[in-house]
Amino acid sequence: MARNKVSVIGAGNVGATTAQRIAEGGLADVVLVDIAEGIAAGKALDLWEAAPVSSHDCRLEGGGDYALTEGSDIVVMTAGIARKPGMSRDDLVRTNFRVVTECTKKWMTYSPDAMIIMVTNPLDVMTYTTYRASGLPVNRVVGMAGTVC
Ligand SMILES: NC(=O)c1ccc[n+]([C@@H]2O[C@H](COP(=O)([O-])OP(=O)(O)OC[C@H]3O[C@@H](n4cnc5c(N)ncnc54)[C@H](O)[C@@H]3O)[C@@H](O)[C@H]2O)c1
């Protein structure tokens, strides 16, 4: 039976942790994509090689080519810049709008039936950005947020 496939765009702190949680939970095969393709490939390989000691059999792959993401059930978007000291989430808008728009067009080419979970900040704006850029129905576009201050 085919396993579910989750693609995580952005292999930084949040993206790599997301990939690890998914794999160690045995939830899905995972693809990590990043503009820094060697980082994505390396982190995916590290996580995959740890599978025997973490007791899961999920497959992890990584790189910069969106063809790897083909047929994803879920795409988790973590790519973009994070806040630096003195910045508010709103300071991220201009850069992350460009990143989210560009990435959405790329993964949509390979997984038009996926559901998107947006993590990149500012969350409400980026969730709306991917909703507009993807053309997906509202019930397939989700923003992930906890209690932040
Ligand atoms: N929603 C939430 O609750 C929540 C929580 C934590 C962080 N965030 C947000 O998540 C985002 C990621 O945070 P982080 O700590 O992982 O940052 P990070 O800097 O560790 O990782 C971001 C990654 O995105 C990659 N990236 C940048 N532009 C890209 C592009 N065009 N295509 C592909 N990859 C690209 C970078 O190379 C980097 O590896 C930030 O915007 C942050 O504010 C949201």
Image: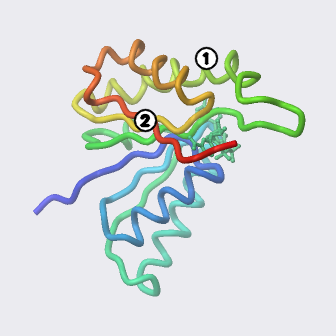
Instruction: In the displayed orientation, state which residue is furthest to the left.
Output: 1
Q: Write the residue at 15% across / 58% down.
A: 2
User: Which residue type does callout 1 highlight?
Assistant: Arg
Compared across the picture, whether 44 is left or right of 107 comes to: right
Q: Nearer the viewer, residue 145 or 134?
A: 145
State yes or no: Cβ of the residue under disc 2 lies below 8 Å from any atom of ligand 1: no
Q: For the residue labelled by badge 1, is the local secondary structure a helix, a strand or a loop?
A: helix
Q: Is the residue marked by circle 1 packed among few (<14), some (14-19), or many (20+) residues within 10 Å? A: few
Q: Position of residue 7 (x, y in %)?
A: 40, 45
The alpha-carbon separation of the residues under discs 2 and 1 comes to 17 Å
* Above or below for 39 versus 116: below
- Identify residue for label 2: 66
Q: Nearer the viewer, residue 86 or 12?
A: 86
Q: For the residue labelled by badge 2, is the local secondary structure a helix, a strand or a loop?
A: helix
State yes or no: Cβ of the residue under disc 1 lies below 8 Å from any atom of ligand 1: yes
What label sits on residue 98 in the rendered view? 1
Q: Based on the displayed image, in which of its 4 quarters is residue 29 positioned?
A: bottom left
